[in-house]
Amino acid sequence: MEQIINRVANGRPSAAKSIAIYGPGGRTVLPLSELDRLARKMAVHLQRLGISAGDRIGIVARNRLEWLLLDLAALKLKAVTAAFEAGKFPATAALAERYGLRIIFSDEASDASCIQPMDNLLATLEALPQDIDLPPVAFAPDDVTTIKFTSGSTGEPKGLAATVGSIDSSITATQALFYHAPEDKLFIFLPLSLLQQRYWVYSALVYGHDVVLSTYELAYYALSREAPTVVMGVPAFFETLRKAIAARAGSDDPPALRRAAIDTMGARIRYLWTGSAPASPDMLRFFEGCGTPIFEGYGMNETCIVTKNAPGAHRRGSVGKPIDGKRVSIDEEGIVVVHSAFPVNTSYLFCAPGDSERIFQPDGSVRTGDLGRIDEDGFLYILGRADDIVVLTNGRNVLVRTIEEKLRTCPEVENCIVVGSGEDRLSAILCAPHGEAARDAIKRHIADLNDTSRPDERIGAFLIVDEPFSIENGLLTSQYKPKRRAIQARFANEITQASRGAI
């Protein structure tokens, strides 16, 4: 296992490779050597603010250059970053007190003395000496570099202190599978508060390849201009990209689709990486038909990357085989259990009583809550969440994930969940861009599905909602997964009325 974090903290990367950043103020391109130079200056700025090894600094901001500089500077000082998703956590003195933060950097205005504005940081760094040497730091595998937070699909987000060993192990294992080389350019756009997004910047600094960082809002614009070799994205992003490519092609002719894919993503794509949520088989087949390999994987905040499809070991429908340093088993209830040579941690840092014990096992393994199976060749298949099971009044347990995937194949359906626990039949809450105007098409689609489904898996009623499922309105997690309980609570009265009728 390579010492990735020690190399990021102490190394001097080459000027031959660069990072392009799409954020406030437009596009910024820096050689990696310049990114590191600015990070060293940022470390001095943090020292002048009184930050030293072990201190916690909060970052509440959208993707931007200053976010990266703060993260890299903290590594150079052995300070600990607490990464908060912008829009979910307000930058306040109460946040600093709750999480033991010496200071918070934010792109939002605040009068609190502990809040430092992002917008002034680059100007502040200009006044510092041009080249700065810092004493080397040494991280041990059990040291913590950052506190990340669960997506919060249920209850208050829980804090998780990520260890150096888990980061080093994950990046090393990924590099062994995909060999990101100087010719590569990795494209990332999910929030940097999700630690895995920072992996690819660390990878660029250590292995010497280009990287592009965008916000989600600018991702499609940036993608067509950067010609990356690798795109890291959640399935929802690739579903939207699929629709754009299909519309540009204007037909199902494979050569036309390949040309449209090149026009949309550039001509250099080596592979696409997806995970964090279920990927539909149709979407995976589409990109493969465009001549673009797409590899699905599996992981969670509590485990880092667990399994991954990769060149030479790829089985569509699975989430791949365990990466080096990970072992997977299935317990007596069908739940996936992950064993790590270098665990992220063995408990939550901030949580309600009993939360840690429910997922972190006495032997250090993680009981994920995901239902799965392992085939004879070692590929893992995720069947759904244990809490995705709906229990009908006849006692039948219905796993609704596959039903929801089939509902989403209707062009009129943007997103959906299936509910029905305590009822005698299933119901669906469907987000449709055209609202009630799409009712007849959706009704026909559901009727077709019901014709080929077992009685307990048929949809008995459905509700079409105009409000989209989004992160902003609290109906999607930061990884674009539907928040089942929040959606059901939001539309409780309407789905109750709909369920009294029949399709």
Image (cartoon, grey):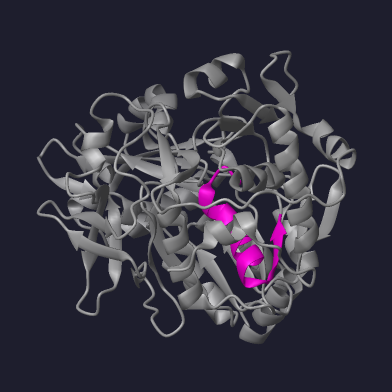
Residue at image coords 35%, 27%: 351
Residue at image coords 49%, 34%: 475
267 within the magenta span: no
Measured as percent of width and height from the top left, residue 214 is found at 71, 53
In this rendered view, identify the residue nearer to me: 249 or 294. 294
In this rendered view, identify the residue nearer to me: 121 or 300. 121
Q: Is residue 97 left or right of residue 134?
A: left
Q: Is residue 501 left or right of residue 39?
A: left
Measured as percent of width and height from the top left, residue 314 is found at 40, 79
Q: Is residue 289 visible?
A: yes
Corner quadrant of residue 372: bottom left
Q: Is residue 480 left or right of residue 112?
A: left
Corner quadrant of residue 113: top right
Q: Residue furthest front?
A: 135
In this rendered view, identify the residue nearer to me: 262 or 162. 162
Q: How many marks?
A: 0
Measured as percent of width and height from the top left, residue 61 is found at 67, 35
Magenta highlight range: 192-213
Residue at image coords 22%, 55%: 337
Q: Quadrant of the N terminus?
A: bottom left
209 within the magenta span: yes
Measured as percent of width and height from the top left, residue 201 is found at 63, 59
Residue at image coords 59%, 75%: 180
Q: Quadrant of the C terminus?
A: top left
Is 218 rendered above or below residue 262?
above
Q: Is residue 282 visible?
A: no
